Amino acid sequence: MLDWNQMGSRPTAVDLFAGAGGFSLGAIRSGFEVRFAVENDKFAVQTYKRNILNAFGKTNPVVLDGSILEYVPTELAGVHFQDRSCDLVLGGPPCQGFSTHRILNAGVNDPRNELVHAYFDFVKALKPRVFLMENVPGILWNRHKPYLDKFYAEGERAGYDVRQPIVLDARDFGIPQRRKRVFILGVRRDVHVPPKFSWPPRQTHCDPAKVIGSLEPWITCSRVFDPTSENDANNMHMNHGVELIQAFKNTPVNGGSRKDSGRLLACHKGHDGHKDVYGRIDPSKPAPTMTTACINPSKGRFVHPTEHHGITVRQAARIQTFPDHFVFEGGLTAAGRQIGNAVPVELGRVLTSEIIKHLIVSDSRKLGVARKYFEPAERSEFQ
């Protein structure tokens, strides 16, 4: 095993609202050591401990399983960073208040939105070189402007250059899923930003009909549906009634929709919306966005391309680029929620690799060792 005492300590990170650990795992693959994570969903905590906490020997992060509002950031900084400074703070505050599925003024003054600023209390206490916040595009709606304005004001007062929000689509970075999320990067003002630092990272994939230069076509989700091991605890899907199974049988394979099946519910009458519900995933394209209800075909286009049931937990996890050895705790619904809330592991790696390369690690030899050590054994083949 690599001797980091000889090579020098790895850069440090903290993951807030850590969920099952997608962002953490992406950062670890880039070469970061996660010192602690905060998450209060009990099943997500169990998943994090099983897959992240037990996987990295002496670099185990501490998992704090209460509400982020229960902790005093300055106290945690004193406990977990006695020997080192913090390099990176990650985290995506719960996004329900900003969801595009919420209508009219729903979400305005939602107490959950205040968690955005609790996140920043940690930034002020830990004083990381860099912080990176993730959220849904709905956070950019005008109705939420006061919260973002406060976030930026606090960042400036704390000594950070906070860059404008960027909206990234996961499929542009080699993830087999169309998934748009907002990322906000803050860089401490005393950190040297080299001219070659590119933010956001340059996309690597694009629409197959528009491939130019070095860009590759979007990765389809076809391999997601390869067989899994017989003892895979997450190879499970919803049990459907006879009527629904028949509707799936009537739905054309590889992309067929609810209308094709002849299934018409009362809630479908009078409008032409909700076209994707009970629809089949098209494996020749990137998958749809994995939501917290991704294992439920009534909530979106989450039916298996050819079989007559919703996708499995493992298939949803593969779409989010979790490796097959990553096990989600809590059963079907809890696992789906953890997967839908996660930052795709590979996207997390791409983003934090750009940060570690240009803003954290100046020793190229150390960076090369970090990549050699983490990436081959840990990266998922389902990307």
Image (tube, grey):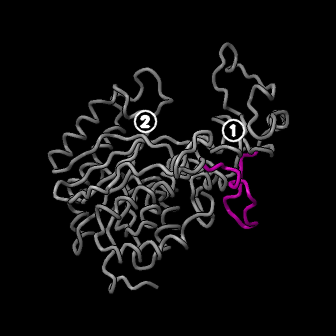
According to the picture, the residue beneath numbered tag 2 turns out to be: 137
Give the magenta range. Answer: 218-239
What is the tally of numbered marks visible in this picture?
2
Front-most of residues 87 and 240: 87
Residue mark closest to the camera, 2 vs 1:
2
The residue at the point 50 percent across, 57 percent down is 20
Residue type at numbered disc 2: Pro
Q: On screen, 225 above or below 50?
A: above
Real-space Cα separation, disc 2 to disc 1, in angstroms = 23 Å
Image position of 355 (left or right of 77): right
Is residue 193 located in the magenta-colored stretch of the structure?
no
The residue at the point 36 percent across, 55 percent down is 90
Residue 95 picture location, percent across and down: 42, 40
The residue at the point 66 percent across, 43 percent down is 285
Image position of 11 (left or right of 302): left
| Chief secondary structure of the magenta portion | loop
Front-most of residues 228 and 352: 352
Residue 69 picture location, percent across and down: 30, 49
Is residue 232 located in the magenta-colored stretch of the structure?
yes
Q: Earlier along the polypeptide chain: callout 2 or callout 1? A: 2
**Mark 2, secondary structure of its residue:** helix
Label 2 Cα crowd, 10 Å radius (few <14 / some 14-19 / many 20+): some
Residue furthest to the top: 270
